Image (cartoon, rainbow, N blue to C red):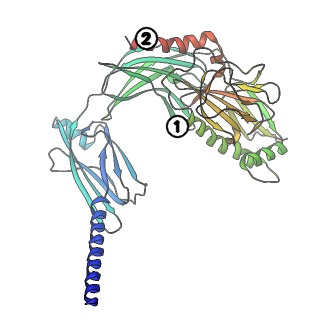
Amino acid sequence: MFFKRNKAKFYLFFLFVVFLSISYVAFVYFVHRPGFELFSKDMISYSGFRATIDSTNVTVNSIQISGSKDGGELINIYENDEFLDSGNKIKIKIKFAPDSPVVKMIKNDNLDYFYLHYSIKYENKFFSSFVKDKIKLKIDFDPPSISNVDSDAYTYLGGIGFVTYDTSLDTLRSYVDTGIEIAGARRMFYPLSITKEDRISNLVFFTCFNAPCKNKKIIIKAEDISGNIISVDTRMKTIMNKEWTVSSIKIDNVFLLNKYNEIKKNNLTSAGAKEFKELNIEERKKNDSLIASQTSKITNKKLFNSRFLQMQNSKVFSRFSEKRIYYIDDMEEPVDSKYHFGIDLATTEKANVYASNTGSVSYVNGDGVGIYGKLVIVDHGLGFYSLYSHLSTISVKVGEKVNKKTVIGKTGQTGYAQGDHLHFGVYIQGVPFDPIELFDKNYINLKIINIYNQFIARTIQ
């Protein structure tokens, strides 16, 4: 009797384990499979489409996307049979050429609807299988509209410009292209937007960096969820009110060695051109990328109401966009050249550094950001930021509200600094511009504060 009971328990346990195993395998089969999602949901445009494949817990081996007008004959759009290992998401962006078979089919048959077919081959823990389906999509070929474009149509060299415009309610996003590239990437400027019953009103502050706006114009672009894009050009004159300086800088080998070891946390016994380039090219690029990301966000509220202040009792000894040509000791040929995107301010050693204007501390690094050393970034709203680097000490924390009487730290020579000073920079949506512009009361009222106040007053009516 005892053995019969144990045998029955064993069989029950065995059946329970089998049930759990089958349930788990079924769970994997039905749940661990890729999902396909269109960014535009139920619409597609002549320009193309974007899609995301959820590859969580699976390996995607191939993707094939086709189109048809009635769910029948397929026209190939996209295929990839290479091994796709991209974490949990695979993003696909398809652009249709004007003469592509898909566009021709849509136009020739004057289609209102279109079928998108997809087939995804994948593997999970137990199975190799396919996911196949089709989606019926509406054809959207009407781009959003841009109207009521207004600007004073000029910037000072290295300064700020503005433009206001309205877009239709179907606008997913809009932005301004001034034609500038930094570190090989095109930079766009995005708006402060207020949605009303019949339109979206937009205000964009921008800079053309350290040169005139490309082709003496800016381009306003608006895009809808289907990918339709419209562009409007507006002229933008650059007033050449200054010239950028050029300076030669000699680097002492002992100084280079000490700074290399400090920044790279190394213990070399000698340093030369190789180490200099590692700092001035590779490290600088990495540091500038971090600063750009930390100064790109737009805080919609304006946090300042007056001009910015230069550090007390300081003298500008290196200006914005100064071209620096570097030599090592007595080498006749330069080892590198770079533009300086800020101003260097000299005063007494370890002098108090005050916030240049009211704002909120958005980034602090007391360990040092490469060539910039210890630094603080303050968000002033509307996409404007100020940066303070080479500090010896820091007195503020992220999220702290500051004003012109707030000490954020003391000057120093951390990072790649020759002597105690403050490197001060200002940024608009991740792009540096000339800080001198913001020290002028008339300029900041004319180009920023009054424009913002008028925009808000006009849009709340």
Residue 241 spot, x, y in % from top left: 64, 14
Residue 460 spot, x, y in % from top left: 39, 13
What's the residue at 24%, 43% (across, down)? 101
What's the residue at 80%, 32% (across, down)? 420
Q: Which mark is residue 296?
A: none
* Quadrant in the rendering for residue 24: bottom left
Could you tell me how far apart the alpha carbons at marks 2 and 1 are, in whole angstroms? Answer: 35 Å
* Quadrant in the rendering for residue 434: top right
Q: Quadrant of the N terminus?
A: bottom left
Residue behind mark 2: 457
- For the residue carrying disc 2, how many other residues have a C-alpha within 10 Å: few (<14), some (14-19), or many (20+)? few
Q: Amino acid at mark 2?
A: Ala
- Is residue 232 depicted above or below 134 in this figure? above
Q: Nearer the viewer, mark 2 or mark 1?
A: 2
Res. 80 visible in picture: yes
- Is residue 315 depicted above or below 258 in this figure? above
Q: Amino acid at mark 1?
A: Ala
Residue 141 spot, x, y in % from top left: 25, 31
Using the image as rendered, state which of residue 78 and residue 40 is in the foreground: 40
Answer with left or right where residue 201 lies relative to residue 250. Answer: left
Answer with left or right where residue 39 lies relative to residue 248. Answer: left
- For the residue carrying disc 1, how many other residues have a C-alpha within 10 Å: few (<14), some (14-19), or many (20+)? few
Residue behind mark 1: 185
Using the image as rendered, state which of residue 420 and residue 181 is in the foreground: 420
- Is residue 324 depicted above or below 286 in this figure? above
Sequence order check: which comes first, mark 2 or mark 1?
Answer: 1
Q: Quadrant of the C terminus?
A: top left
